[in-house]
Every structure is written in C-alpha cells, then in structure tokens.
Amino acid sequence: MNATTPTNPWGIPDHLRQFEPSQAAALARLRRVQPAAYARTRNALDGAVTGLSPYFTHGMLSLADAARSINVQSTALGRAPLGFDDKLVFEFGWREFFHHVWQHAANQGDAILRDMHSSPPWPGKYADTVPDDIRQGRTGVPAIDSTVRTLYATGYLHNHTRMWLASYMVHVRKVHWRAGADWLYGHLLDGDLPSNHLSWQWVAGTLSGKPYLFNADNVLKFAPATARKAWASPHTVLDTSYEDLEDRAQSKAGAGPERGAHAGVEEPALAGTNDAASHESFVLLRQAIQAPFAIETIANKHLELVHPWALSPRRAESHDNLFRLGIIHLPAHAHWPWSARRWQFVLQAMADVTDAVWIGDLGSLDLSGCARATTQATQFPGYREALGRVATLSPAPRLLPKLPTPCRSFSKFYQQVQRDVDAFADLL
Ligand SMILES: Cc1cc2nc3c(=O)[nH]c(=O)nc-3n(C[C@H](O)[C@H](O)[C@H](O)COP(=O)(O)OP(=O)(O)OC[C@H]3O[C@@H](n4cnc5c(N)ncnc54)[C@H](O)[C@@H]3O)c2cc1C
C-alpha cells in the first residue's frame, strides 16, 4: 500500500498502521530494527521507530529478548552490539523506569494515578472530561485532529504525537491529565498504565516539575515529508512562541476549538464490562475466538494462568502435565475499558499461546482440582489481587536490575543502573 493513499493522508509508515497479534509478527519487526537509524530519526513521525510497544505491553516479547535478538543480528552484520549509550536502550530504560515507579507506587495504593511529585503549572481546577471536539478529531488544529484520527485508524501513535496530544489537552485546553490518560489508554493497542499515565504526568509537569510545551514549528519539523499538510498547524493556537505557551500553561485562560465548522469522526466504542452495550460487543468478540472450556480438563494439571500482560509463547521445555489457561478477569476491565481492536488483539494472541481461555470473575473459578497454579506477577489493579489469591507468583521479566529504593528521576535511575552493572551485555 502506498503511504499516501487516501486512507492514510497522514503519511504514517505502513508498519505502524497494522499490528498482527502474533509473536512471529513481533520477531519480524525485530529483524527490521536498525539501532543507528533509530537514534538518528526516532523523533520524526516517519522515522525508524520499531512499532514493538503492543508486543512489549502484552508480554509477547520481553525487552531482554528483543535486545538479545538485535545483538545477534548486529553481530551477523558486523555492527557493534547494543550498549547503555544506544538511544534504543535508553528508551527501553524509560519503559523500565515507569514500571519501577509503578512497582514502588503500587505499595502505596496506585499512586501513579494521582499527581506524583509536584503541582501542575496552573493551580486551578482542570476539566475532568475530554471535550467532544477532541474526541471527534475536530478541534481545527491539524496536528491534534490528525493524531486522534490516526489513533482510531491504527490503535498506535508515534511518541511525538502522544506528547502533542497530551500537551494540547492539558496546557491549552485545561483538561486534567488523568482524564486524557484514561481516555487514551483504552484506544491504544500498547496502552500500558505506567508508561501512559506517567508520561501524561511528565507532560503535565506533575512528574518532573516542568511542563512539556510545543508549537506549530515543532510540528512542522517532525511531520512526515510526504504529508506535511495533514499536520502543519499555522494560524492556530499553536502558532505562537514558547513564552506565550508558557504563560498560557500558567494561566487560567484555556482555549476552545478553532473557529469555524470542522467535520468530526466517530470515536470507536470502548468496551469494559459494566454496561450492557459494551458487554454485548465484548461477548461477540469472545464468541469469535474462544473455544469452550470445561473445568475437568485441568484436573491434576500444573496450571499456568496466562493473563493479558503475559502472553509469551509456551516454553519449548515445558512438561506434558502443564495446562496454560488464558484468563480475562472481568471485574478489572470495568474500570479500564478497551477498544474492540485491542480486545481482538489480546484475545487472539491469548488464544494462540494457551490451551483454553477463561473469561469471568477469578473469585468464582475453582482451582482446587489442579495440582498447582502459577502465574506471572502483574501490578494491574484487580488482576494483582485476584491472581495473588489463586496462584503462586513469579516475577515479570525485566531488562535492568531491580533498584531496591524508589527513584523518581529517570536520569538518576539510569545512572544508578549503570553503576550496578559493568556492561549492558552482562544483562542479556
Ligand atoms: C502521553 C504519552 C502516552 C504514552 N503511552 C504509552 C503507553 O500506553 N504504552 C507504551 O508502551 N508507551 C507509551 N508512551 C511511550 C512511547 O510513546 C511509546 O512507548 C512509543 O511511542 C511506542 O512506539 P514504538 O514501540 O514504535 O517505540 P520505539 O520508539 O520504537 O521504542 C522502542 C520501545 O522503547 C520503549 N519506549 C520508547 N519511548 C518510550 C517512552 N517515551 N516512554 C516509555 N517507553 C518508551 C517502548 O517500550 C517502545 O516499544 C507514551 C508516551 C506519551 C508521551
């Protein structure tokens, strides 16, 4: 498909428009990774980014396996192996940092869902809902409308467009970061609570103390060369200086949509489990994918519970008595609904790596007949508690060593990690 056909007026590279829910697809992406090109171009919307985030989020691939595989490839091609100075490793580090903060915050009750560190730049009350013109991609600011439309069309956003969307929402429109974060989370295939909510906080200024601001020049610099028009935002609220944006971020004056009529797009429904309509679409998806599961099939088995953040393939050395049961714990999804696209991605990937998929309230699943039950730990609210009650937990895979004390600054976190190990290769 040509990158500028009418269905893709935004110039989004093809590999960032569709995400096959399989490990084979993740491995194919890994083979295309070029660390040097990544470092040079990752900030551009058509730069050499990997599109690996949906696979990392759902545990279909670990950061360590990815780094190992890239190194094997580099050796074969005569390139240097990855090190701490590589931009890609640095970005992997950001993901691990956010999970580190989550791990420590979880002990204090999901603190990442509230202001972490400092106050936002303006002390007033931000709106607690996302305005309709943003949800429908009709703000009249091309950088924002194209971002929202890309999100709905693909389930993926480039890092820069996430930053633009969050900054516009919080600092220009005065919407609370939590409302924006909750909304975006449900539409992303890679929606990851710590990466998403802490990034929103970083943009809002409540994580590091400094808000992220951007203007129309910044958009032009990073827009795809083939589709500048779809992004360029001259004569809009963004067409201004950084001093002006800073004043705006610190003042009460929020802007509305641009003047004039703008046609919108329909927001895809988010399906949780707490209302009949969303439940109906969820049940349809479930019927399309799930084979019937009978509790007798797990009698005397070693049961491995496979939840949505641990969708790794069955290990080659696993024994015959192992039964891998996919788990969708419905109560947890009432608060964190997903798009149909994401349900499809997760349920398909889960069905592929398990012997059966079970959907319901974990509190009602009787596991007394099986020999033992194990699962990978997750901090995800609802799953964290429910899995802990029925199974023995093993730690989720990580790339960087675990720091025993909380660290809320990324640079300190990354420095500390490097002090603790001699070379990046030692971690693989
Ligand atoms: C407002 C906002 C919301 C975000 N929400 C999410 C989210 O829900 N899930 C998510 O995985 N990431 C999120 N990010 C971080 C980042 O935008 C995505 O990880 C990245 O764009 C995913 O695309 P990629 O795999 O092509 O990234 P690449 O640039 O190819 O990077 C490779 C991997 O490094 C990690 N990474 C790269 N950049 C970041 C970053 N800034 N922070 C943390 N990890 C990073 C990711 O695991 C990514 O898959 C968010 C960022 C912002 C500003």
Image (cartoon, rainbow, N blue to C red):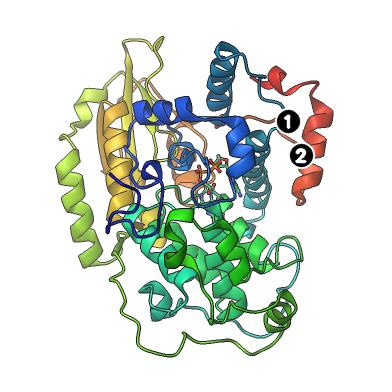
The image shows residue 416 at horizontal and vertical percentages of 82, 36
Note whether 343 is above or below 349 in the view shown.
below
Identify the residue at horizontal 42%, vertical 59% (top origin).
227
Say which of 209 and 167 sits in front. Answer: 167
The image shows residue 391 at horizontal and vertical percentages of 45, 32
Name the image quarter holding the N terminus: top left
Say which of 18 and 129 sits in front. Answer: 18
Q: Is residue 194 visible?
A: yes
Residue type beneath disc 2: Tyr
Residue that lies at the very extreme toward the front in this rendered image:
226
Residue type beneath disc 1: Phe
- Mark 1–mark 2 Cα distance, whole angstroms, equals 9 Å
Circles 1, 2 touching at the beta carbon (< 8 Å): yes
Q: Is residue 398 visible?
A: no
Asked if residue 31 lies left or right of residue 240, the reply is left
Identify the residue at horizontal 46%, vertical 51% (top origin).
191
Residue 336 is drawn in which quadrant?
bottom left
Note whether 188 is above or below 168 in the view shown.
above
Residue picked out by circle 1: 84
Note whether 46 is above or below 202 in the view shown.
above
The image shows residue 106 at horizontal and vertical percentages of 62, 50
Say which of 263 and 324 sits in front. Answer: 263
Identify the residue at horizontal 25%, vertical 63% (top origin).
278
Q: Secondary structure at mark 1?
A: loop
Residue picked out by circle 2: 414
